[in-house]
Amino acid sequence: MGAKFKVKKRIDEMVSDEVMEILDNASVEELGRSEKGIKTKPLMDAGLNTVASIINSDITRLRRVDGLGEEAARKVKKIANDYMIDAKKQVKIRLSADNKSEAASNLIVAVTEYISGKEVSDEEAWSLFSADPISYYTSIEKIAPGVLGNDDTKYGLPEELAKDVNEQSVSLEGLNCTLRRYQEWGVKYALRQERVLLGDEMGLGKTVQAIAVMASLKNTGATHFLVVCPASLITNWCREIAKFCNIPVIRIHGSDREAAIEKWKDEGGAGVTTYETTGYFTFDEEYKFNLLIVDEAHYIKNKEAQRTKNTLNISKHADRMLFMTGTAMENNVDEMITLMSYLKPDISSSVKKLSFMSAAKQFRDKIAPVYYRRKREDVLKELPEKIETREWCTLGPEEEKIYEDFTRNKKFMDMRRVSWNIDDLTLSAKANRLREIAEEAEEDGRKILVFSFFLDTIEKVSSLFGDKCMPYINGSLSPEKRQSIIDDFEKAPAGTILPAQIQSGGTGLNIQSASVVVICEPQLKPSIENQAVSRAYRMGQSRNVLVYRLLADDTVDERLLERLEEKQKEFDAFADLSAAAEESYELDKKLIGDIIQEEIDRINAKNGYKAEDTDIVMEKTSDSKDDT
């Protein structure tokens, strides 16, 4: 049996199981409701209580039911078969490592063998699925379109435009990840239309779509790409490009920005810069580069702002432009039209007079060639799922000085507060990124949980957001008070933030009304992080859960993650899957000492001198217990 045929067979089996479960739970009375004149009492008296029991009975069995007769028996059988066909059309399979049924396991094994070309066990297949579910979803979508619920062949575009997009070729050689079908469609759209605003909701992977556009253009001869983004995202962009494709990355920011600009012009690759740095770019009149990507494009909605003027000056030299924003531009049509005017002025001019009917299909069809937005429920029918993102932030000079002072004095707890132990939060890279995440979450109709180990960090989050914050949760609150806060949070509007110390807010609470979780620093026990995330990602959660881990580049955050990943591998290889094993999976004092010394050595090397070793200071703080 061919691998593809086997996957199709397993899909059919899983669908059949789902259908039979529906029929088992459908009373035979449903048949009487759908067709007048059907007598269901004789069937129930005969023990045929469900639609499944009718499907599993042949005509001879039905004919023998007292009070039914030949004609009625055939009619009942036909109606039950029609009911089954309708049920089959509605069934969309869901795959989850939390539900390893026999049918689901058979399918996961078949897809693994289809992808890898080798036989695998159930356990190995589920492990591979958990590590890379996107590859599995993509394979299933190709073999059985629509079975995951993603059967929209146009993804909301007008028919003619959808046809053009579908015919667009795309070359993804050198892309180090698997795109979902809707993501590949987004790449085709950007390539086909050349100057567009991609407005997919947060969590759908706009960044990876942009990187895929670069990769496809590179494969057809393009050499120069430029990303403009907020300063809080520059590190993230550099890391994501390096991770997902083979295009060289040049960071254009800071004191060496002019040299970096010239290097990018001379050598090509993906230049990544900030809105503040755009004023340093100058080009000869005839100079052209292949693609300009503008992330968080709503930053240039004001035509009079200097960063807008600078970005538009750069755009004059770009063959293609890809603007991106997770903010729903439909909520402010004037801003939408402004951004579209930078890309395709003719379309923005033609829709100005229609702005009053922005919710109408006529308006959406008019702007479809330049503005494209998908919602999760439209393209990811297998949701809810958990989408985890590492948000790498770059420290400013003041933050860096504070961090280096604490590191040289080996104050581990203060090192862990990196970016939060600065008095002026406008200078905090993590606080600024949290503000951006919160703004996007509010636009998206979501509420936010913010966790930190440190009470003073939670207090700073509360002061940062003021009235948008609920009272924070810590260990000193009574259970009644905690529940009262959560009850109020349930009723609060989108954009509301609930801060909590991770040791107290991460257990014993059900907070499904929040679907964004932000963790302010890496924890020494990953089980604590997992418990915190599970406050929102649990039964009853109707939306996918977005988890953001705020991390500072070139700091203890990075060292902690490296060690925790090593520990995770040890745990996966040797530990029994038990609560005790999970609890023992944490960093010990020796590893922490090694991390501190590595950071001291790195800082000394950066500054050109070597410090004398001193005893490790594993101080206890007034607002938290030592979690090591």
Image (cartoon, rainbow, N blue to C red):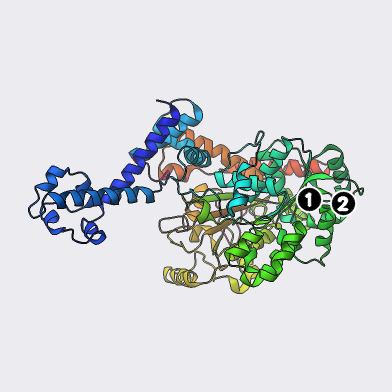
Q: Which residue is mark 2?
A: 281
Is 191 on the left-hand or right-hand side of 271? left
Q: Which residue is mark 1?
A: 273
Q: Residue at x 61, y 70 (%)?
A: 357
| Magenta-drawn segment | 95-101
Residue 422 seen anywhere in this rendered image of the structure: no
Q: Is residue 272 above or below residue 1?
A: below
Residue nearer the viewer, 171 or 455: 171
Residue at disc 1, secondary structure? strand
* Of the image marks 2 and 1, the number of the one nearer the N terminus: 1
Q: Residue at x 51, y 59 (%)?
A: 515
Q: CA distance from mark 2 to mark 1?
A: 10 Å
Residue type indicated by callout 1? Thr
**Residue 21 lies within the magenta run:** no
Task: Give the percent coordinates (x, y) of residue 256.
Answer: 86, 47
Task: Give the percent coordinates (x, y) of residue 521.
Answer: 61, 53
Quarter containing the N terminus: top left
For this orientation, the residue located farthest to the left is 66
Q: Quadrant of residue 561?
A: top right
Task: Give the percent coordinates (x, y) of residue 419.
Answer: 69, 57
Residue 58 seen anywhere in this rendered image of the structure: yes
Instruction: Kindly check if marks 2 and 1 are in contact, taking CB atoms under 8 A apart as contact.
Output: yes
State the predominant SS element of the stretch in magenta.
loop
**Residue 96 lies within the magenta run:** yes
